[in-house]
Image (cartoon, rainbow, N blue to C red):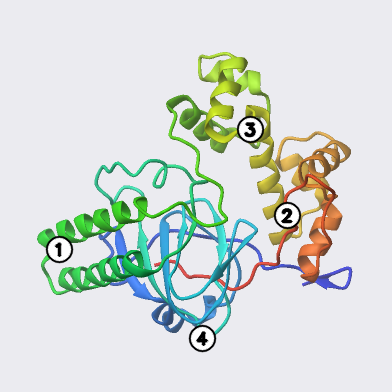
């Protein structure tokens, strides 16, 4: 489909977890080459929103993996963590090789990994080397072997082995240094955690700090203080950032008009949505869509988020 002379970006595919070889198992381990060979029709079809966790450990080649409009440079030793609800697209470069670990949110045992498992905005990109890389490589290899053990029929012990090996991998990731060039993930404050969950559930219908504070049985002042402690940003900025992210996704990956997107996100008037989007991103909705489709956006005004990069590639679900 073409609009105003520009091809529309591929629509987002909502992908549910599925292990084709072991349907009852909440984890799957494969290589990127196996992924592409198994489902070539989805190997470059476009961006996807997963309902499961995806770990990507790059072993060879290079490329750019997109996660929620952020391009992550991938080279040997790169580790990516894509969480449920995030929109991502794999690099298209054919020389890229990686080990993939897919698992459902309820598969790992209880762990002290801070926000890594529960916060969809936690760290997503590490450049590992030395002992860190050797440990991660070994643990992903052990997971692949444990998955083979399960497939050979050792279901009960195989499940335990997979669950505990995954736990070791996640704990090892939690011990990695803070990602270079990445923001420090927010702390797991109880009030802030409940607020983020409430925003994720209700951002399309509610943008009022007072309404969320009432829902959480607290005051707007206390809620804002919790957000400032966890992220350095007021509660209103956290809410607006989530709404703006969804607006970006819809502008890039659907052909809905800006007015229709605004209505979907709770704006009665298209003009109000346009003002909101420009204030939070530095772009008009139309300019953002055009820039994303052309792959050559200009920088937005001072203080706005980085310019969007055009998504590319995809990953099929398990």
Q: Which of marks 4 and 1 is nearer the N terminus?
A: 4
Mark 4, residues whose alpha carbon is within 10 Å: few (<14), some, or many (≥20)? few
Secondary structure at badge 3 equals: loop
**Spatial distance from mark 4 to mark 2, Cα to Cα?**
28 Å
Residue at the front extreme, as displayed: 130
Vertical arrangement, residue 101 with respect to residue 192, above or below:
below
Instruction: Say which residue label 4 marks.
Output: 95
Which of marks 1 and 2 precedes in the sequence?
1
Please identify, in this view, whether the residue under mark 2 or under mark 1 is nearer the observer.
2
Marks 2/1: CA–CA distance: 45 Å
Secondary structure under badge 2?
Answer: loop
Secondary element at image label 4: loop
Q: Mark 2 points at which residue?
A: 306
> Mark 1 = which residue?
158
Residue 43 locus on image (x, y percent): 53, 77
Q: Are marks 3 and 1 in contact (CB under 8 Å)?
A: no
* Mark closer to the chain start, 3 or 2: 3
Tell me what residue is drawn at x 35 percent, y 50 percent.
Answer: 174
| Nearer to us in this view, 249 or 232 | 232
Q: In which quarter of the image is residue 262?
A: top right
The quarter in which the N terminus is drawn is bottom right
């Amino acid at each position: 489909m073409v609009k105003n002379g520009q091809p529309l970006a591929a629509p987002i595919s909502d992908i549910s977890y599925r292990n084709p070889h072991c349907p009852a198992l909440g984890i799957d381990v494969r290589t990127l080459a196996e992924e592409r060979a198994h489902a070539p029709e989805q190997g470059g079809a476009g961006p996807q929103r997963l309902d499961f966790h995806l770990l990507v450990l790059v072993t060879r080649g290079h490329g750019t993996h997109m996660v929620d409009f952020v391009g992550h440079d991938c080279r040997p030793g790169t580790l990516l963590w894509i969480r449920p609800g995030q929109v991502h697209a794999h690099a298209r470069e054919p020389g890229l090789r990686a080990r993939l670990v897919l698992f459902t949110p309820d598969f790992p045992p209880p762990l002290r990994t801070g926000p890594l498992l529960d916060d969809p905005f936690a760290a997503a990109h590490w450049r590992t080397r030395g002992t860190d890389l050797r440990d991660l490589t070994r643990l992903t290899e052990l997971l692949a072997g444990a998955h083979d053990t399960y497939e050979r029929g050792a279901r009960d012990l195989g499940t335990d082995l997979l669950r505990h090996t995954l736990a070791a991998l996640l704990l090892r990731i939690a011990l990695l240094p803070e990602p270079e060039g990445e923001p420090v993930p927010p702390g797991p404050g109880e009030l802030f955690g409940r607020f983020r969950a409430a925003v994720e559930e209700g951002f399309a219908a509610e943008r009022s700090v007072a309404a969320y504070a009432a829902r959480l049985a607290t005051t707007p002042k206390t809620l804002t203080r919790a957000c400032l402690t966890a992220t350095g940003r007021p509660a209103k900025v956290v809410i607006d950032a989530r709404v703006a992210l969804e607006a970006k996704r819809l502008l890039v990956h659907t052909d809905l008009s800006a007015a229709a997107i605004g209505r979907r996100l709770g704006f009665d008037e298209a003009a109000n949505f346009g003002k909101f989007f420009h204030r939070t991103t530095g772009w008009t909705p139309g300019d953002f869509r055009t820039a994303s489709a052309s792959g050559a956006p200009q920088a937005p005004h001072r203080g706005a988020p980085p310019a969007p990069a055009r998504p590319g590639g995809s990953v099929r679900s398990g």
